[in-house]
Image: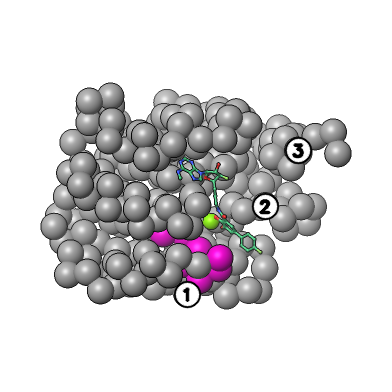
Amino acid sequence: TRTTRPQRLLRAVQKNATRNNPLSVISAIDDFCRHREWAMNVGDEKGFILDSVVNEVSPVTALELGAYCGYSAVRIARLLPPGACLITLEFNPDYAAIARQVIAWAGLEDKVQLVEGASGDWIPRMKEHFGIETFDFVFLDHWKDSYLPDTKLLEECGLLRKGTVLLADNVICPGAPDYLEYVRKSLSYESRFFKSHLEYTKAEDGLEKSVYLS
Ligand SMILES: CNc1ncnc2c1ncn2[C@@H]1O[C@H](/C=C/CNC(=O)c2cc(-c3ccc(F)cc3)cc(O)c2O)[C@H](F)[C@H]1O
Ligand SMILES: [Mg+2]
């Protein structure tokens, strides 16, 4: 096919969503993925849980690992308080280009800093490059075998503080078993599972919310 799925998803946003209206962008993507082509966005059901955790934390500094097409960046950024910002890391240039346009269509470019690069390279540079002391909130939705190494890297770089909330997508499907075992056994985290379903399907999935206790 000439176009890629992310390009068709972006076209659906530009056709069906209203500029500067984040909710219409979210709905356009959910409709596209439910009725046209499935895509690995966190989706509406798990997205509702994501929203409630973001509202509870009300983060001033937020980090997302894995932007893909920008769906969860829009979900998170639309809820951020004034002056707050989301840094989202995406190392696939094609996905990064689509995500930038989705975020711009939603009118949220001032609240989101999309960094085209790998988490392993950029997490150690958060302090000196972005002036970040610690993150209030981290959403993990990138390669599932990278959840654990990147969490340990965030700890080692001193980017987590007492009360930082980590929220991980897909802890059942596709699954992140080593990450789950770590946050559930470690005395440094208070962890809780939110049962849900794989985006746009009836398959079991869920989010793991883990509070860093330092
Ligand atoms: C490793 N460091 C990285 N740094 C920056 N960007 C990264 C990095 N690693 C990946 N990326 C970037 O983060 C994204 C990766 C998302 C991966 N997500 C999934 O695989 C995933 C899969 C399913 C799924 C479930 C059932 C099924 F039958 C088929 C699929 C559902 C989900 O919700 C998912 O999130 C992006 F693609 C990649 O470039
Ligand atoms: Mg996911």
| SS class, disc 1 | strand
- Quarter of image, res 81: top left
Q: Residue furthest right?
A: 1
Q: CA distance from mark 1 to mark 2?
A: 20 Å
Instruction: Return the residue nearer the eye: 142 or 110.
Output: 142
Disc 2 C-beta below 8 A from ligand 1: no
**Between discs 3 and 1, the one toward the N terminus:** 3
Instruction: Return the residue nearer the eye: 58 or 4.
Output: 4
Neighbourhood count class around disc 3 (C-alpha, 10 Å): few under 14, some 14–19, many 20 upward: few
| SS class, disc 2 | loop
**Residue 184 in the image: x percent, y percent?**
29, 72
| SS class, disc 3 | loop
Asked whether, in this view, residue 177 is left or right of residue 174, the answer is left
Mark in front: 3 vs 1: 3
Neighbourhood count class around disc 1 (C-alpha, 10 Å): few under 14, some 14–19, many 20 upward: some
**Residue 100 in the image: x percent, y percent?**
55, 29
- 126 versus 208 height, above or below: above
Determine if residue 176 is in view: yes
**Residue 39: mark in rendering:** 2
Q: Which residues are magenta?
A: 168-174
Asked whether, in this view, residue 69 is left or right of residue 46, the answer is right
Rendered residue at 36%/34% (across/down):
121
**Residue 170 in the image: x percent, y percent?**
50, 63
Mark in front: 1 vs 2: 2
Q: What amino acid is at disc 3?
A: Thr
- Name the residue tied to disc 3: 4
Disc 3 C-beta below 8 A from ligand 1: no
**Residue 101 in the image: x percent, y percent?**
60, 28
Q: CA distance from mark 3 to mark 2?
A: 11 Å
- Name the residue tied to disc 1: 195
